[in-house]
Amino acid sequence: MLSVRVAVERGEIVPSVPLLVNTGPMNTFIGAFAVTSKLSGHVYDCRFSHIWNAIATRHSDTIDAKFLVDGEGRIVGLHHNAFVEFRSKAGRDLTDREASFVAAEYLRERLEEEDERPLYDVAPETVTCLIQQIGIK
């Protein structure tokens, strides 16, 4: 199967796939959301800040998403290998907005269990599962 990029270069018609495009300011990719702990009932106030390539800044093979949880900064590091795998299977890259949704879903799952950390490193297989769970294709 040809990649979308090669097909477009050849002038072929490529069916579009639904994706969450990067429009508007980055901090509006995901609206504020609340997460309730299954253990204590505490309600966490979560706000997305931004996403960036941590390969250069943290020297890790991740794409980092920053959230404010009850006003405190939390980083969700999505392992880059999952992005490479997605590209090879889907024929396109994940958008920043889509990656933000994956990071938010991971954070939601952790906070429901009251797993509070300043930094979450998310394994490639977990990122891949979340992509499928959300329904990104």
Image (tube, rainbow, N blue to C red):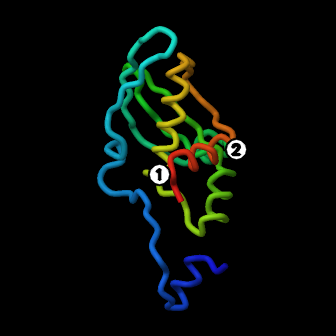
Q: In which quarter of the image is residue 122?
A: top right
Left or right placement of residue 127 versus residue 98 in this view:
right
Q: Where is residue 82 in the image (x, y as percent from the top left)?
A: 66, 51
Tell me if residue 16 comes above or below residue 112 in the rendering: below
Q: Is residue 44 above or below residue 61?
A: above
Residue 31 against residue 94 in the figure, above or below: above
Q: Quadrant location of residue 48?
A: top left
Q: Is residue 43 above or below residue 3?
A: above
Q: Which residue is at 65% across, 49% downward?
A: 80
Image coords of residue 113 (percent x, y):
55, 19
- Mark with earlier residue (2, 1): 1
Between residues 50 and 105, which one lies in front from this camera angle?
105
125 relative position to 76: left or right: right
Residue pictured at 58% horizontal, 49% vertical = 132
Q: Name the residue under label 1.
A: 98
Q: Position of residue 125 (x, y in %)?
A: 70, 44
Q: What element carries label 1?
A: helix
In the picture, residue 54 is in which quadrant?
A: top right
Residue under circle 2? Answer: 125
